[in-house]
Amino acid sequence: MNLSVIFHGDWEVYAHRDPVSGKRELLQEHIVRCEKYRIRISQERKLLKIEENFLTKLGLDKDDFAGKLVKEMIDAVILFHDLGKGTPAFQKNKMGNPNTIPTKYWGDDSSHSFLSAFLYLDFYLYEIKNGFNKVEKEQKKALIALAWELSYVIAKHHSNFESMEAYLKNFQLKAEELQRKWKEEPVPGFSQLRYFYEIPIAKNINQYFMCRKAFGRTENDIVHYFFIRLEYSILVACDYYATTEFNSGFEMDCFGKADASKFREIYERSHLMESIRKYGKESYPRKKWDGKEKINILRNELFLEAEENLKAAEEDSIYFVEAPTGSGKSNLALNLSLKFLEHADKVFEIYPFNTLAEQNRHTLETIFGKTEAINDIAVVNSLTPIRGRGNVEEDPEKYYKEALLDRQFLNYPFILSSHVTFFRTLFGTGKEDIMSFFQLLNSVVVLDEIQSYRNAIWTEIMIFLNSCAGLMNMKIIIMSATLPDLSQLVDGKCNVVKLIRNPEKYTLHPTFANRVICNYELLQEEITLDRLRRHVLENMQLREKSGAKILITFIKKQTAYDFFHRMKEALGEQSEWQLKLLTGDDSIYERESILKPIRENVWKKVILISTQIVEAGVDIDMDIGYKDISKLDSEEQFLGRIARSGIKNGIPGIVYFFNFDQAEKIYRDDYRMEKSLTLGNEEMRTVLKEKRFQTYYEQVMHYLKEMKNRKTSEEGLEYFFSESLKKLDFLKIQKRMELIEEDCWHVDIILCRKLVMEDGTEKDGRKIWEHYKELLSDYQMDYSEKKVKLSECQSDLNLFRYQIKRNIQIPYNEMIGELYCVYDGEQYFQDEKIDREKLEGDHMYFIDL
């Protein structure tokens, strides 16, 4: 379809004006640019095939009248998205267009998105009505619903999502006014209304709700949900790329598709892979097991079994990998990802914490070195600065614009990110959350440690992931040492392929199972911190000559601080033992200064006191552990930090469990905190020893199913799907699917001081703060350059950033937004460790956990 079908004026209508040069872009030129990028994305990412998946799920055949009309409706979103800019007010006020025609009714309103959506609906509801004799009744309902939902995409392409119901209420108010004005005087150059000229607006809105209710199945509602997100992200991407091209002449020609051969060739030549391939040819599968196999043999067997099982299930979508800590899951997942990448477009590796993404980037650097492949791997989170391609000195404008677009739309072939970032892409309502959704097309997604998600939404996670994977042609690999069979929660509606058929073959092998002894003697008494200190000191005496690395983990941060001070007092100043404290209070700099010497075995005698931040994925190998009990899968994660590489010198690791803080009060909504499911129950100790986690998770699933089957409860599945999903209430869906409850009761504070980095360079917090202020106040700098430089500056500021409770008495020197800055941050540190008592004496209180 061409613009002339809607607009008949013989004067120029503009879409954009460069604020510096005054150069203007014709609306038709902008549409052509947008369509060019849609074609490019479609060709690179097989978009047409994906959209046909959606149509099929909605009962529409791509080759009949209804299917062809929907495809036209999808394509026309770009044509209509800026039509509202044709009003005299927009042309005069925004574009400085000298050809505007005076009007009586159209006033001075320069907004355009809603009017564009209104015109889109007027055109296509008319087409649907006229084509009624060519479509079945159910098809007509689907067409009407999709027309309204695509109008929502147009109306929101400059804003965040809300609920469909709120949009429709707003539509009725605004559309009735538009209808009245259009009857009196159409916008100059536009045709008279076709559908909304006589038909009452309220009647049409009710018609939409009736059409949506006609599709009773949850699966159908999820299709509509993801369809809107996909078409929104495509429109916004094309709009951004086209506008950038007009403003700067920079033409985007790459959307993050990976070159599989580039990765695979380097990977297969690595020393690790050559060793595995040699084992595969000579020894796999191992016919007899004597229980004395070394850890690398088990890793090889596990790796090759998963690869072999994948070959028989390449057409499926969701895969489970359950394997013990230290068994090489990261390398196994990389191999599976690269296998899929031969027919996919890109890889997402998703981790529980931002620090794990950075950690795995370093691991990938050891494999891909300084090759071109490593440049295709990007860490995407709030801690990592935006990176560009090429040399900034050669073409600064192109460098910064390309870098910002790459980050906004995730134009990277291989992405390392966090669970929170990934779930915002799936369920967030902010424009920045949704605009990169199309990058999930034909992707491979590795989800690490899925059991760390709130178990109250495990069922919803599986339902959404299963649907999204099928619709978007995704491959999802879910892996963990303690992996619940989440497919049980969806009553067989989700087919999951287990790539390790018998996990116990590995988890119960002596090399893994016997490397750590669990000791429960401290659970037999009412523990005090002084009693715990005496126990630790006794173990230190036994290891005085050989040394040991001792890890002590508490649930509450304050308890960790209290015990740290008790141990510090007991050791005195002359002790050879390194005493360290690691909590969520620590900055990135402090965290790494503690963990790096432990990883590299610099300290032979070390006691690390921590909160549970060390449980999942922190790459340290300790000899003795103490842990305040909480969830059983957390206990297994903790065991993975002890004797991580196996038994040393014939001495296994040992972990002492105790019960000090009441974990059930902290994890109030977690069904895993039922007393019968913790180590307070003898049966669970057996489960932990024998690694029978499915027995444990069966009981957890029972609790979850009971809750989900409560039809009238807001926690129940039926209520959520009927009240939130069917009504497309995006805000409620986002709230339901949050992995971490938003904490509105803390603020960030910058404690300025000077830090010496590993390479000997100095970072001065005060200078970085001043540079941050300069960037914010520079209104002449190009937007893209400013965003990239701010991300670099914020990455440096994170070295000095801490979270504290909100308190109006904070003794700060400056504040920008809700970011506080203290110039003399050094006063709050003692022996390179933050002085919590001094901070709290000045009314700055850390958050509790």
Image: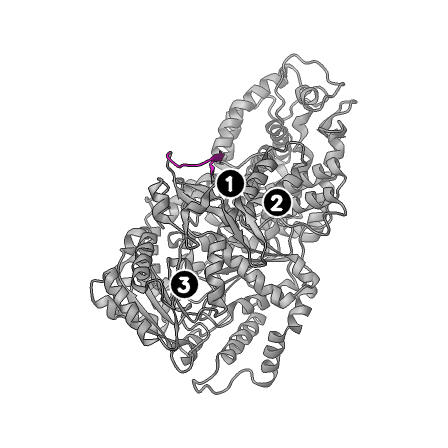
Above or below 814: residue 588: below
Of label 2 and label 1, which has the lower sequence position?
A: 2
The residue type indicated by label 1 comes to Thr
For the point 61% across and 20% down, the residue is 109
Local crowd size for mark 1, using a 10 Å CA cut-off: few (<14), some (14–19), many (≥20): many
For the point 49% across and 28% down, the residue is 169
Residue 1 at least partly seen:
no
Quarter of image, res 721: top left
Mark 3 and mark 2 in contact (Cβ < 8 Å)?
no
Q: Label 1, on which residue?
A: 429
Measure the alpha-carbon separation of dots 2 and 3.
Answer: 34 Å
- Let me know if residue 360 is in the magenta part: no
Query: Is residue 94 left or right of 796 when viewed as pictured?
Result: right
Q: Label 3, on which residue?
A: 484
Query: Is residue 262 left or right of 686 when viewed as pictured?
Result: right
Relative image position of residue 439 (x, y in whole percent): 61, 50
Relative image position of residue 716 (x, y in whole percent): 36, 48
Q: Label 2, on which residue?
A: 408
Give the residues drawn in magenta, as a range: 809-820
The residue type indicated by label 3 comes to Pro
Above or below 371: residue 75: above
> Residue 666 has which mark?
none
Secondary structure of the residue carrying tag 1 is loop
Residue 444 at least partly seen:
yes
Relative image position of residue 241 (x, y in whole percent): 69, 41
